[in-house]
Image (cartoon, grey):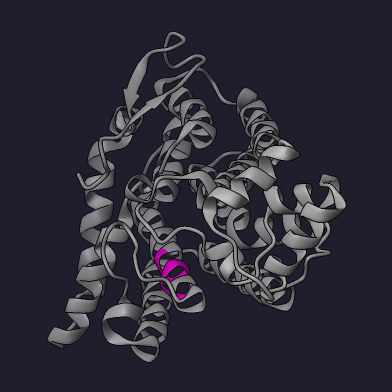
């Protein structure tokens, strides 16, 4: 299986406090299913053109954590009924996710992803944009193989919201006055909604009632928002080798994230004025100086604490599910979000 064996610290019902687990351990209830998902993913994208296959081979390295398909499968397993349709849906949500990453790398002018040059750095922006479109179109093609149109409608509605989030973020690039609630709206649309629909479809396809489906959607939304907040934190304080992508791009591209928003709100006039110039792309700053500014206002810890609140909300929604290894993995995965270093 392609999921990385990366050590993390988890707490709660899955393990004793302080026990070190592997991400693959959390996927044990669905490990064989994830192998099928990877096969479906590869078969769907296979092309008659060699250069297209080469580009698709490159994005396979993006699969990394396989978090969204794992959530679809674990949700189904936790409810009790995992079918072939779930495996198809898991491949679909991963394709949509991959497409957003490919497009993000174009928008951010990134030069690294998972330790490798991304498609935009290899083949140029035009080819990368078209590759993202190719992934999206194949996601819908694969989704249309299901008997019901429900999943296609939900995936379509979700991709619309993701695009709205990207447009909203683009509108606010360079905005040093970005309010926290707008940032969270962007995060919810860009990241939370796809994680939410992964869990929602897992529950719906398993035959769960509306209350459970909505609870699992809420779990995914909260977990996804927390994931993006931590991603934004790692963009500032992460290790490039561990995170596996170009760091410092948020400020370079004029994106105000939760740590900088909090710092601007609480910093001294001197620090706030300097940081405003950086967010407005009128000045640059090195990582050490930026971390010093954020340290003055404890802004990194503030962002992490917000992510932890969203994780707590996510775990609360699991209370409607019966106790099982799959539910335990869902709990541990939510905790992994705020403890991860990649």
302 shown above or below 255: above
Residues shaded magenta: 98-103
342 left or right of 230 in image: left
Question: Which quarter of the figure has residue 140?
Answer: bottom left
Res. 214 visible in picture: no
108 shown above or below 190: below
Return the x and y of residue 327 as percentages of the image width and height. Answer: 48, 26
Return the x and y of residue 83 as percentages of the image width and height. Answer: 36, 45
Query: Residue at 41% across / 61% down in the picture?
Result: 246
Query: Residue at 42% across / 36% down in the picture?
Result: 74
Q: Of 1 and 91, which appears nearest the observer?
A: 1
Q: Main secondary structure of the magenta part?
A: helix
20 left or right of 322 in image: left
Does 102 lie within the magenta span?
yes
Return the x and y of residue 132 as percentages of the image width and height. Answer: 40, 78
Question: Which quarter of the figure has residue 274?
Answer: bottom right
Q: Of 177 and 217, which appears nearest the observer?
A: 177
250 left or right of 8 in image: right
Image quarter where the N terminus lies is: top left
Query: Residue at 15% across / 88% down in the picture?
Result: 49
Work out which residue is located at the far bottom of the displayed protein and give it. 126
Work out which residue is located at the far front of the displayed protein and give it. 270
Return the x and y of residue 271 as percentages of the image width and height. Answer: 77, 53
Res. 300 visible in picture: yes
């Amino acid at each position: 299986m392609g999921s990385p064996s990366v050590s993390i610290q988890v707490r709660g019902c899955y393990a004793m406090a302080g026990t070190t687990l592997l991400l693959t351990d959390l996927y044990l209830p669905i490990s064989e299913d994830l192998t099928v998902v990877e096969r479906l993913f590869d078969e769907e994208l296979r092309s008659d053109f060699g250069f297209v296959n080469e580009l698709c081979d490159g994005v396979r390295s993006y699969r990394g954590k396989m978090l969204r398909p794992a959530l679809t499968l674990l949700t189904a397993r936790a409810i009790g009924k995992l079918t072939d349709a779930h495996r198809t849906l898991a491949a679909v949500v991963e394709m949509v996710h991959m497409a957003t990453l490919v497009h993000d790398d174009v928008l951010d002018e990134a030069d690294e992803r998972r330790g490798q040059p991304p498609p935009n750095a290899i083949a140029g922006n035009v080819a990368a944009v078209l590759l993202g479109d190719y992934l999206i179109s194949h996601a819908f093609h694969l989704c249309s193989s299901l008997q019901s149109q429900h999943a296609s409608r939900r995936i379509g509605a979700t991709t619309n919201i993701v695009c709205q989030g990207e447009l909203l973020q683009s509108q606010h690039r360079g905005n040093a006055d970005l309010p926290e609630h707008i940032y969270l709206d962007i995060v919810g649309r860009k990241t939370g909604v796809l994680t939410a629909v992964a869990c929602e479809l897992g529950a719906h396809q398993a035959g769960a009632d509306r209350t459970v489906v909505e609870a699992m959607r809420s779990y995914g939304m909260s977990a996804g928002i927390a994931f993006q907040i931590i991603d934004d934190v790692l963009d500032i304080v992460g290790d490039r080798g561990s995170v596996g992508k170009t760091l410092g791009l948020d400020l370079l591209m004029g994106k105000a994230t939760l740590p900088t928003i909090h710092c601007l709100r609480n910093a001294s006039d001197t620090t706030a004025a300097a940081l405003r110039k950086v967010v407005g792309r009128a000045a640059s700053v090195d990582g050490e100086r930026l971390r010093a500014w954020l340290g003055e206002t404890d802004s990194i810890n503030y962002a992490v604490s917000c992510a932890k609140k969203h994780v707590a909300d996510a775990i609360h929604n699991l209370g409607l599910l019966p106790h099982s290894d799959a539910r335990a993995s869902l709990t541990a995965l939510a905790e992994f979000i705020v403890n991860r270093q990649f």
